[in-house]
Image: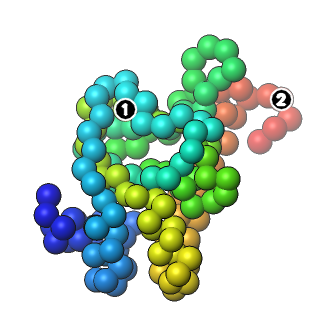
Amino acid sequence: MAEQSKADLLAGEAFFRDLDGEALEFLAGCATERALKKDEVLFRHGQPADRFYLIRSGRITIEVPAIEGPSLDVQSLGADAVLGWSWLIPPYTWSFQARAKEETTMLEFDGAAVLERCESDPAFGYELMKRFSALMSERLEAARRKMMDEWNPPGFA
């Protein structure tokens, strides 16, 4: 995929929509293509986080790993979803785990390079922070709902 086509692709995605052309070009330059096989783990809870992803095809499940037994599937994400926000917030470790539920293709973004740009260009950083803050809120709410559905302790809502 050529750099220009990556920028055009990003411009058409809801998460990146309305970013200026220079910001889209920068992000496109930080993106590489990545493929996962079914059941391959993309990242694990607690590992260093320095990437984020745009799913192009396939499915990724966000999981909360258990101390014993199977992980709790929190949310399933498909094409056009953005995944990963832990690269943006110290201590830069993954808060969840992610696993491919089927063969998946994605764009993988160099979070360290993007974070450096956020630090040096506050307007760019603020714009991305607003977008990723909404993503964080969505993921945490999905985790809360799933845990309540699964564990449903009396007295909790």
Residue 69: quarter of image? top right
Which image quadrant for residue 2? bottom left
Can residue 14 be seen here? The reply is: no
Mark 1 lies on a secondary structure that is strand
Q: Which circle, 2 or 1, is nearer the viewer? A: 1
Q: Which quarter of the figure is the C terminus placed in?
A: top right
Residue 4 position within the rendered picture, expressed as x and y whole percent measured from the top left: 16, 71
**What coloring was used for the rendering?**
rainbow
- Pointer 1 residue: 100
Q: How many marks?
A: 2
Q: Whole-percent x and y of residue 116?
A: 50, 71
Give the Cα separation between the discs numbered 2 and 1.
33 Å
State the SS at label 2. Answer: loop
Q: Please rate how many residues cluster around mark 1, counting C-alpha atoms within 10 Å: few if below 14, some from 14 to 19, many from 20.
A: many
Chain-order first, disc 2 or disc 1: 1
Q: Is residue 92 above or below residue 115?
A: above
Could you tell me residue 137's position as x and y percent? 61, 57
Residue 142's place in the image compared with 132, above or below, is above
Kind of residue at badge 2: Pro
The residue depicted at 57 percent of the width and 61 percent of the height is 88
Q: Is residue 78 visible?
A: yes
Q: Which residue is mark 2?
A: 154
Spot occupied by residue 117 in the image (x, y as percentages of width and height): 47, 75
- Tell me which amino acid carries mark 1: Ala
The foreground one among 19 and 35 is 35
Q: Is residue 137 above or below residue 7?
A: above
Please give the label number shown on residue 148.
Answer: none
Left or right side of 119 for 109:
left
In the figure, is residue 58 to the left or right of 156? left
Q: Quadrant of the N terminus?
A: bottom left
